[in-house]
Image (cartoon, grey):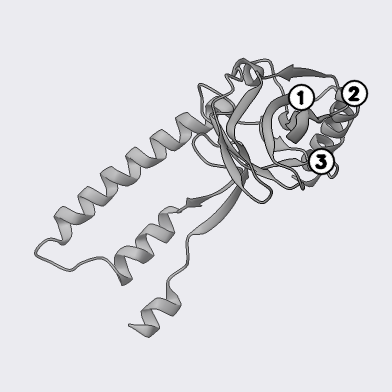
């Protein structure tokens, strides 16, 4: 069995950076070639009695997975989902979740500051291959019990239009726009600076791909 394991090729792993439906910021998609599948059958597939039935079932499942994967990926292919690292902001996005109905289906926000957070707002910069961009703003979200330093909170769906992908956007970059702290102190992002940073991040990611 050890010899068989050594001779069988492992499935190739392709890194998809924040652009596959239903995956959080980054995800791995496993791609098998026909040769990989033949190796698996030769080395690991169950032997007769049920071998034929199981092989047929595996083929059907693999075909269904590939069909769903292809259709889902095509809907947002080429539009990367990213977020800014904002060193001076008391709150930070640490995870994002995307779908083909809402480009920010959900997220996780962490209090990285020293005061409790009572309210926040998320924004996004839509970047196009031409270098142009536009800013969108979500609604303020209250945290009734306060978000203490080091704690996290789930960000609700932001209703970010998926039409940006149809428009040919190369990236949608999310960031924190406003934070209301204890005693009504407020932190606000400079939108022009955020837009510039988003364009630089998109260019860096595109150049690396």
Residue at 78% from the left image edge and 22% from the top image edge = 128
Q: Nearer the viewer, mark 3 or mark 1?
A: 3
- The alpha-carbon separation of the residues under discs 1 and 2 comes to 10 Å
Q: Quadrant of the C terminus?
A: top right
In depth, the one of 191 and 198 nearer the eye is: 191
Mark 3 near mark 1, Cβ–Cβ under 8 Å?
no
What residue does disc 2 label?
A: 192
Task: Return the disc, 3 or 1, that comes first in the chain's sequence.
Answer: 3
Task: Decide which of 164, 14 is in the foreground and name it.
Answer: 164
Q: Judge from the rendering whether residue 87 lies leftward or rightward of residue 156; answer left or right.
A: right
Residue depicted at x 12% and y 66%: 48
Q: How many marks?
A: 3
Q: Residue 69 location, x and y as percent?
A: 45, 37
Quickly name the residue at label 3.
86
Disc 2 packing (10 Å; few <14; some 14–19; many ≥20) = few
Q: Position of residue 191 (x, y in %)?
A: 86, 23
Tell me the SS state at disc 1: strand
Mark 3 vs 2, N-terminal side: 3
* Residue 29 in picture, x, y percent from top left: 51, 49
Q: CA distance from mark 3 to mark 1?
A: 14 Å
Q: Which mark, residue 125?
A: 1
Task: Please name whichever residue, 140 or 168, is drawn nearer the observer in this view of the structure.
Answer: 140
- Is residue 181 left or right of 19 when viewed as pictured? right
Q: Is residue 39 above or below residue 26?
A: below
**Residue at the image position 60 percent from the left and 36 percent from the top:** 19
Q: Judging from the image, what secondary structure is the residue with disc 3 in?
A: loop
Front disc: 1 or 2: 2
Q: Quick one: label 1, few (<14), some, or many (20+) residues within 10 Å?
A: many
Query: Is there CB contact under 8 Å for labels 3 and 2?
Result: no
Q: Residue furthest bottom?
A: 2
Q: Position of residue 72 (x, y in %)?
A: 48, 31
Question: Is residue 177 visible in the rendered structure shown here?
Answer: no
């Amino acid at each position: 069995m050890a010899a068989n394991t050594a001779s069988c090729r492992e499935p190739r792993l392709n890194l998809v950076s924040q652009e596959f439906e239903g995956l959080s910021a980054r995800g791995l998609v496993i791609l098998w070639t026909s040769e990989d599948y033949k190796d698996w059958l030769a080395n690991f597939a169950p032997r007769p009695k049920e071998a034929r039935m199981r092989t047929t079932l595996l083929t059907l499942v693999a075909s269904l997975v590939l069909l769903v994967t292809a259709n889902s990926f095509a809907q947002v292919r080429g539009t990367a989902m990213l977020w800014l690292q904002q060193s001076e902001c008391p709150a930070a996005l640490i995870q994002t979740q995307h779908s083909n109905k809402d480009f920010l289906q959900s997220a996780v926000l962490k209090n990285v500051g020293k005061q409790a957070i009572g309210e926040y707002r998320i924004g996004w910069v839509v970047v196009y291959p031409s270098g142009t961009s536009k800013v969108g703003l979500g609604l303020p979200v209250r945290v009734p019990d306060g978000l203490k330093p080091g704690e996290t909170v789930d960000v609700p769906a932001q209703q970010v239009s998926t039409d940006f992908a149809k428009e040919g956007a190369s990236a949608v970059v999310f960031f924190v726009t406003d934070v209301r702290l204890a005693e009504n102190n407020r932190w606000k992002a400079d939108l022009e600076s955020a837009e510039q940073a988003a364009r630089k991040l998109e260019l860096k990611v595109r150049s690396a791909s």
